Amino acid sequence: MAEAEVASAPQGEAGEKKHGFALPSAYTILFILIILVAAATWIVPAGTYEYNEDGEPIPGTYQEVDHDPQKIFLDSLKAPINGLYGIEDETGNISFWNNGELFGAIDVALFIIVIGGFLGVTMKTGAINAGIARVVAAMHGREKWMIPILMGVFALGGTSYGMAEETLAFYPLIVPVMIAAGYDSLTGAAVILLGAGIGVLGSTVNPFATGIASGFADVSISDGIVLRLIVLVVGLAFGILFMMRYAEKVKADPSKSLVFAQKEENEKFFLAGEGASEDFGTFTGRRKIALALFGLSFLVMVYGVIPWEDMGVGLPTLWWWFPEMTASFLLFAIIVGVVGGLSEKDLTGSFIDGSRDLLGVALIIGIARGITVIMNNGLITDTVLSWCESAVEGLSGTGFVLILYILFIPLTFLIPSSSGLATVTMPIMVPLAGFADIAGELVVSAYQFGNGLVNLVTPTSAVVMGGLAIARVGYGTWLKFVWPLLIALALLCGVLLAIAAAID
């Protein structure tokens, strides 16, 4: 689900592990940041802005106030808990809002857990696996056209629900087919990695990237969807042309393959040995309906969050946000499970298993939100905003957005969890964008594009490293292969962000 929580050791050309330094997990990185921020409250001057009725800081109103340093040990331990639950107000009650800002993250965390259960139920029905297997079988003998079709299917999964870890199941199916068609294992791996990765880069309604970032930016998930849709369509076109060019070159001359040295070994392994494809089952009527309901669930979510009244469209506005979206996915999990023929035991078991898979993501959000808790309680959030306001003073909106976009690239390496990165950065970046008269949805898009680019190549991603290991493609080979496309996608995102900022 577009997450890079687990650090995976880099692997060699034949998939063997190399021993050496490994980055700590996102949990450790975020907790270290909490401690460092707590220490910073003893050094950084405390201060505050005046806020307007919408809870937005008013530029030029910053003033220093009395220090309120945080206890480095005790407050750091409490921060992730308060990050989920909120803060105590003057009456001692837990408050989820402070100066117009959503403070607690429990609604987002619960949404993530229910989404995990929903995905677990859908996967248990076999609908997604059987559907993709059906595409592969239908294109037998016309493998050339499998590249755009499969990349489109995986991109659809990436843009809708952040398809990432789920792709690992398809390498044993698609890599052997590509090798048998005269291509190579790199072609099979890239079709999956780039298809889903470009989908995540151009996330339209992805609840793990767009949804969480939009929630903490206090904008609708539908805001900025046109810009992200353009990146999805154009970026996918770039990826398909790039892949088809490479695949045809390899088929015409196998020695042009970047994994040519492993050709005989890979053919033996994938076509007759351990890496041979598995049976994903038939695409039954039940599975077709389950897959249709799966897609419908995201359409319902999009309809529910769009403010049709504000847009002047004659459709009823539901004014949904995380509680309503969570309830909707819970309902669809039950419907998909029943239609998919799951027993009560299988339905509840797969829901719990799917929720368990994303429990780490929910915890990441709490830990990341803890950084904001420490900064706000220590009264240094507005001080950091004031420093940033001075730094970007005089910049055009276009210049500001491009700097923001570039900044999210190293931040993604520092905080490899897309959910954690959104939770940490949005409370700072969105008010800062307000000083430059930049809409919050452009901040969300800049975050998404920077994060999406890095997650195509980051060695800390279990999706990247795991997929390459299954396909027996070395990480160095992957970098050598993908860098021209990576540059093209980076330029595409930068140009579109600049245009969007200019006309905002």
Image (cartoon, rainbow, N blue to C red):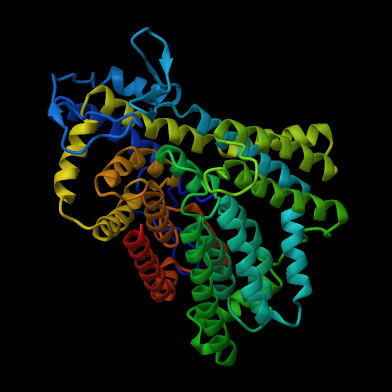
Is 37 on the left-hand or right-hand side of 440? left
Is 360 on the left-hand or right-hand side of 343? left
Q: Nearer the viewer, residue 212 or 55?
A: 55
Q: Residue at x 38, y 35 (%)?
A: 368
Q: Residue at x 52, y 57 (%)?
A: 466
Residue 162 image position (x, y, % from top left): 55, 52
Residue 94 image position (x, y, % from top left): 42, 15
Residue 457 versus residue 44 in the image, above or below: below
Q: Residue at x 44, y 43 (%)?
A: 213
Q: Nearer the viewer, residue 245 or 384?
A: 384
Q: Residue reaching furthest bottom?
A: 252
Residue 295 image position (x, y, % from top left): 70, 52
Residue 215 image position (x, y, % from top left): 46, 38
Q: Nearer the viewer, residue 196 or 330?
A: 330
Q: Nearer the viewer, residue 436 or 481?
A: 436
Is 484 on the left-hand or right-hand side of 307? left
Q: Is residue 284 visible?
A: yes
Q: Is residue 468 visible?
A: no
Q: Residue reaching furthest top?
A: 91
Q: How many marks?
A: 0
Dividing the image into 4 quarters, which one contains the C terminus?
bottom left
